[in-house]
């Protein structure tokens, strides 16, 4: 089960009691699981070093301005991928 803390920032966090509809828990929370994904911003050039960040998020996680990939594109070197707390490489 996905915790409320793990849902923070997700577009569907609205359904975790943050709404006037009376819905207390997101429908994906019960069956969701934490997975490794590769995040990139909407306007980020994918071929630039440090464009992708390895993150651990719920498999249902969505966020405006970010896109999550299960696998890296073929042209991305694994050495160019950042971890969530790493600084951007020059």
Image (cartoon, grey):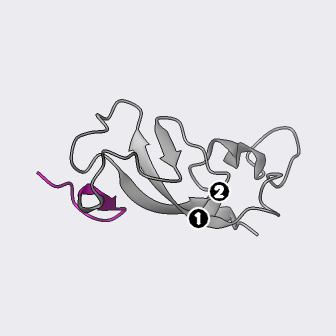
Whether residue 60 sits left or right of residue 43 in the image: it is right
The image position of residue 70, as x and y in percent, is: 53, 53
Are circles 2 and 1 on residues that touch, CB within 8 Å? Answer: yes
Q: Residue at image x 77%, y 60%? A: 29
Instruction: Say which residue label 1 marks.
Output: 35
Looking at the image, which residue sits at the far left?
Answer: 90
Asked where in the image residue 44 lies, by quadrant, the reply is top left
* Secondary structure character of the magenta stretch overall: loop
Looking at the image, which residue sits at the far front?
Answer: 74
The quarter of the picture where the N terminus appears is bottom right
Instruction: Say which residue label 2 marks.
Output: 59
Q: Which circle marks residue 21 in the picture?
A: none
Taking the magenta stretch, the answer to whether it contains residue 17 is: no
Q: Which residues are magenta?
A: 80-90
Numbered disc 1: secondary structure: strand
The image position of residue 76, as x and y in percent, is: 30, 49
């Amino acid at each position: 089960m996905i915790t409320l803390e793990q849902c923070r920032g997700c577009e569907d966090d609205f359904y975790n009691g943050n709404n006037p509809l009376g819905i207390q828990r997101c429908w994906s929370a019960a069956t969701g699981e934490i997975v490794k994904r590769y995040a990139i911003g909407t306007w980020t050039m994918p071929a630039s070093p440090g464009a992708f960040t390895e993150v651990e998020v719920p498999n249902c996680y969505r966020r405006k301005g970010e896109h999550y990939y299960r696998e890296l594109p073929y042209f991305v070197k694994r050495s160019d991928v950042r971890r969530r707390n790493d600084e951007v490489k020059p």
